[in-house]
Amino acid sequence: MKNTISERIFDFLKDFPPFDVLNKKQLFLVSSNVKVTYIEIGKTVFQQGEIPHENFYIVKDGAIGLYRTIESDEILVDICDEGDIFGLRPLVQNDHYLMSAKANEESILYAISVNILKEIIENNEKVNKFLIASFSTNIKTPYAKNNNGKLFANIETLEDNNGNFSDFQTAEYSKDPVTCLKSTSIKEAALIMSSNKVGSILIVEDKNPIGIITDKDLRLKIATGFVSINKKVIEIMSSPVITVSEKITTAEAQIAMLKNKITHLCITKDGTPNSELTGIMSEHDIVVLQGNNPSVLIKELKRAKDVETLKYIREKTSNLLNGYIEQKIPIVFVSNIISEITNAITIKAIELSLKEMKKQPPVKFGWLALGSQGRKEQLLVTDQDNALVFQNVPDENHQETKDYFISLSEKITKKLSIVGFEYCPAEMMASNPDYCLSLKEWKHQFNKWITIPSEKSIMMCTIFFDYNLIYGDLGLVNKMSKSIFNSIKSYEIFLNFLGKNALINPPPLGFFRQFLVEDDGENKDQFDIKSRALMPLIDAARLLTLSHKVKDKNNTIERFQKLIEIEPQNNDLYLMCIDSFKILLRFRTEQGIKHKDSGRYINLKSLNKAEKLKLKGCFKPIKDIQELIKVRYNLSQML
């Protein structure tokens, strides 16, 4: 008689690593011995510190959160969903659970005996490699559906450095460690720890670390009365300390802590105990970094039930951005990651708003991000720019349909405002009836802006031409794009007007190579890096790709890269524009983080000479690209 349950398990497991590399006999052995377990929401599968079960688990349905408790903080490290394995490492390494596993949703788990897996490991090299790669990066499973079906951490991925980026980036650590001398009393050291609100203190000699005391030492050795609190710190310090270099990655730090069964690493200049102490890294630092992992944030977003959760994740994203910028992670990578999270926040805000509507959308629609979010260049939290397009309807149904989508848009923009994206001062939002239009109306609007160019209509084009579909029907957006190019084709002089607009802001240096700053207003004598440096490059890239009828690029760097393909004779200029844009975007982001604002206006007095020279070096490509535009579109007569 056939075991239909076993067959269903077989069909499920065969699509997920490491089961996808098993032969049929091995996979049937596994699926025949699976225990199916139902876990209610909020229930625990296992606890941190618990002796491991005889089984590891794979999620069939639902979601299991992995939590790490350090002191009194419970930190979400990861979310396991369909196809994810968890609880395997302690079984193979014969160690206690390092995290707790708790159901974030009603879940169905497949419990698989580790003994069966061990038998398979001995006869299947691919499974063995999978486990080695998984353990080396401390990922609960190297597989994720949103990674195009690839292993997160297989050997090839590790070599290509395309895996979980947080595991390969330089780990974050405290650069101001609390220290004392070996002559210090335990009581004095405890008071120093208390006043600095830290859980450890390093004992140094000639600036080199020779030992460490943690809260755990105080509890086990002092509070119990085994050692007098008046003794010297050398009586209870752990020594020698484990030291690593400043360039250690998160994965390497995790391995070092596991290998040495410790919770703190000392950072020294050359990575040895005989060099100057520069920092300390704790297990808590690593867990917090894992909790800020982009993939974890995206998973949290997908399961968010309210706008408060969206706001919380947006704040965690800001922490992620700060870490990336501080560690000099490539700005293109940073921009892509932050944009994906921002888009995911917007999508969830839309989904939550749709659930609040009394009925389903009457027709297909598309939600568009505009401006910097549309170009995937929004790193800092700025105001929102968005629009909505909906399918054409008969005239008698138009107002009712539009009212529905305006009501929906009001809910969405309100949620985005709560999250931290303030309302647009100019009301360029889908909640404004002017920007919540049918496809027919949008075609008419774009055609009007293009064929009757004015200062305002050109400005609107520079904003609305950078739209990006965040949610909804792609077909509607494709038709919008096609109508724009048709209008430009019928009125090509529009490109000249767009070119004139691209020259509004001249190169940011005056005659004596002085920065051009604001003449008046609240930002008087400050440098506007957005208008005077970034926008000229953004406008130039948009204009030139439009003139070549490039439909699928709206990111500034991607536009210049496409222009290099189309115009190889201008290769050097466009490469210079890309480099300058990267530097300027990073500079603005750093300023925004430093001053907790949009980073747009910079007080030049706060910059050192090197920073000013670096900025000035970005301005020559602006001058050169504007000269190219002036000649190409014969703009001398229009200026």
Image (cartoon, rainbow, N blue to C red):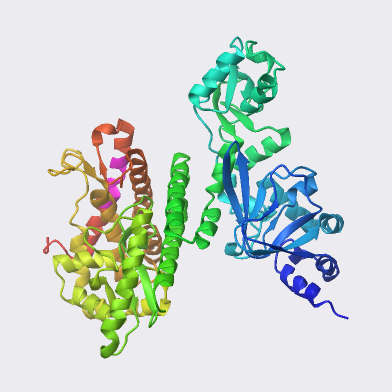
**In this rendering, would 132 be left or right of 501?**
right
Q: Is residue 509 above or below residue 606?
A: below
Residue 532 percent coordinates (x, y): 23, 49
Classified by dominant secondary structure, the portion drawn in magenta counts as helix
Residue found at x 67% / y 13%: 228
Asked if residue 485 can be seen in this view, the reply is no
Residue 315 percent coordinates (x, y): 43, 48
Residue 234 percent coordinates (x, y): 66, 14
Residue 349 percent coordinates (x, y): 41, 64
Residue found at x 28% / y 33%: 606
Asked if residue 94 can be seen in this view, the reply is yes
Q: Quadrant of the C terminus?
A: bottom left
Give, as a single range, the part of the protein colored magenta.
615-622
Q: Quadrant of the N terminus?
A: bottom right
In this rendered view, identify the residue nearer to me: 604 or 173. 173
**In this rendering, would 209 be left or right of 400?**
right
Q: Is residue 297 above or below residue 170?
A: below
